Amino acid sequence: MKKILIVEDVEINRDLLEQLLEEDYELLTAEDGAAAIRLAEKENPDLILMDMSLPVMDGWEATRILKGRDDLKRIPVIALTAHAMRGDEEKARACGCDDYLSKPIEEDRLFEKIAHFLEKD
């Protein structure tokens, strides 16, 4: 079973993502960017869903660190963010995100993007 790391500090958002994905994927969760990096090192997820506005270390910095490391840069990162202004998607991609979804999350688009990166066997 493919492993997804959900990085989200808002409990209701995290719970929603877990409910949507728990039947098809093994899920890991982190509430800040620093914890996300530690979990990625330990668990080697197949995909990361990264909120960008996080405490301790934001998603922008966590993604830059993940993508700067040879052992972690292959993990696709999808930005999940309420930042939906012009230029925000480009900013997310510039820090290393492989894709971008604005909140509130459209379930069909989320599933499409996950399938694109994980291509179920």
Image: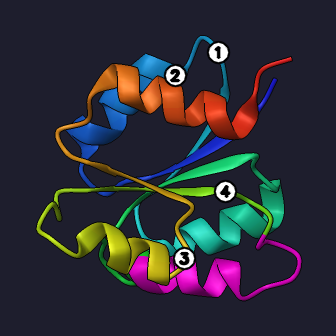
Q: Given contact means CB atoms under 8 Å apart, are the residues at marks 2 and 1 in contact?
A: yes
Q: Can residue 53 be seen in this view?
A: no
Q: Given contact means CB atoms under 8 Å apart, are the residues at marks 4 and 1 in contact?
A: no
Residue interval drawn in magenta: 60-73
Q: Given contact means CB atoms under 8 Å apart, are the residues at marks 3 and 1 in contact?
A: no
- Disc 2 marks a residue whose amino acid type is Leu
Residue 43 to residue 22: above or below: below
Q: Is residue 55 left or right of residue 45?
A: left
Instruction: Name the residue carrying label 4.
Output: 76
**Residue at 26% of width from left, 39% of height from top?**
13
In primary-sequence order, the first of circles 3 and 2 is 2
Way the structure is coloured: rainbow
Which of the numbered marks, if any, corresponds to residue 63? 3
Instruction: Name the residue carrying label 1.
Output: 24
In primary-sequence order, the first of circles 3 and 1 is 1
Q: In this view, does 62 lie to the left or right of 118?
A: left
**Residue at 81% of width from left, 63% of height from top?**
42
Q: Which element type, helix, strand or loop, lies under badge 2?
A: helix
Q: Is residue 112 left or right of residue 19?
A: right
The percent position of residue 56, horizontal first and vertical second, equals 36, 83
Marks 4 and 3 sit apart, C-alpha to C-alpha, by 10 Å
- Disc 1 marks a residue whose amino acid type is Asp
Q: Which quarter of the image is occupied by the N terminus?
A: top right
The percent position of residue 60, horizontal first and vertical second, equals 41, 80
Residue 44 forms part of the magenta stretch: no
Q: In this view, does 9 lie to the left or right of 83?
A: right
Q: Which element type, helix, strand or loop, lies under badge 4?
A: loop
Instruction: Name the residue carrying label 2.
Output: 21
* 10 Å crowding of disc 1: few (<14), some (14-19), many (20+): few
Q: Which element type, helix, strand or loop, lies under badge 1?
A: loop
* 10 Å crowding of disc 2: few (<14), some (14-19), many (20+): some
